[in-house]
Image (cartoon, grey):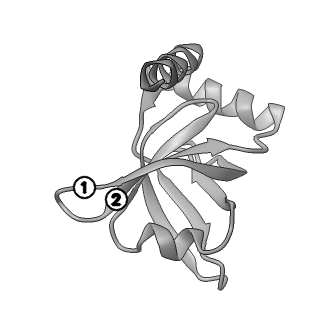
Amino acid sequence: MVGRVLRKLWNRRKDNQRVSLEVVVNTTDPDGHEHQLMSEDMSASGVRLRFEKVGLARILGHREEIPLEISLANEDTIVTQAQLVWAYNTAQGGSVSGWRFVDLAGSARRRLLDFFDAQE
């Protein structure tokens, strides 16, 4: 069973170009306080985020999805909702987590893919 799950994850990742990318990602916790995170990599379907200053539980709270504002280097901002897929604590402190974009509009997806292409 574990093998089947891993194959499914590996195949899904092949469909999406993942780009190592450190950009600022803003979000809010359930109380409305703003927090700034850093991405580690990104694809058209999701993002890996590093949590250092604030805990994952504080950001997620009781919600299934969180709002994300992804600040691209060309001053473009992508706004979307994201759902937690996986998370782990790091040896250096903090945590790393993978988020799936829930409602990334077609135009935002195209802008994101254009941004990836410009990074190569």
Residue 103 on image: x %, y %: 79, 44
Tell me which label, 1 or 2, sits earlier in the chain. Answer: 1
Q: Is mark 2 on a helix, strand or loop?
A: strand
In this picture, is 24 found above or below 22? Answer: below
Residue 58: mark: none
Q: What residue lies at 67% left-to-right and 43% top-to-bottom?
A: 101
Instruction: Specify the amino acid type for callout 1.
Output: Thr
Q: Which residue is outermost to the left?
A: 91
In this picture, is 92 found above or below 102? Answer: below
**Residue 119 horizontal side relative to residue 53, left or right:** right
Residue 9 on image: x %, y %: 51, 24
Marks 1 and 2 sit apart, C-alpha to C-alpha, by 5 Å
Q: Nearer the viewer, residue 53 or 61?
A: 61
In this picture, is 86 found above or below 44? Answer: below
Q: Name the residue under label 1.
A: 90
Q: What residue lies at 63% left-to-right and 30% top-to-bottom?
A: 44
Q: What residue lies at 50% left-to-right and 18% top-to-bottom?
A: 4
